[in-house]
Amino acid sequence: MNELISARETYRNQYARTWNEREASFDCTIDCLLTPVGPSAAPLHGTAKWWGYTSVWNLLDYPAAVFPVTTVDLVKDQVELDYQPRNALDRENYNLYTSPEVYANAPIGLQVVGRRFDDEKVMRCVEMIERAMGKE
């Protein structure tokens, strides 16, 4: 068990060091990260497989908040029939969307991630993004 805790702490320290290096290289403070929640709109019940988009933040103990940005629009969000998947996992994900009508009005979300103990800052960033999107 101690080996797992040690590995986790090493990973957390490396990630924090990378964040610090990015701030130094850009000569700014990075308040939050804006990241996808997954590779697509909200998955159908029982089909979610791509948990790496969110689980990494749990491992790092970084606060994150998921919020809806839009919903699947059957007019705009048609299946790209000429799409060529990059690999087997991409093909599997692509095949989940072969019937867009099943996803009609499904939420499409993003997440805001902050550094450890910056929970309030994460929520403030979500508020700012939503305001910039025209949401009250």
Image (cartoon, helix red, strand yellow):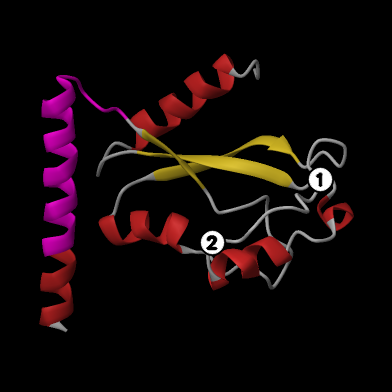
Percent across and percent down for residue 106 are 77, 48
Percent across and percent down for residue 132 are 56, 15
Q: Residue at x 68, y 50 (%)?
A: 41
Q: Residue at x 14, y 71 (%)?
A: 7
- Amino acid at circle 1: Gln
Q: Residue at x 57, y 54 (%)?
A: 39
Magenta-drawn stretch contains 68: no
Asked where in the image residue 4 lies, by quadrant, the reply is bottom left
Nearer to us in this view, 134 or 77: 77
Magenta-drawn stretch contains 27: yes
From the image, which quarter does the N terminus lie in? bottom left
- Amino acid at circle 2: Arg
Q: Residue at x 67, y 70 (%)?
A: 47
Residue of label 1: 78
Tell me the SS state at disc 1. loop
Q: Residues within 10 Å of mark 2 (few under 14, many from 20)?
A: few
Label located before the other in sequence (1 or 2): 1
Bounds of the magenta span? Answer: 10-31
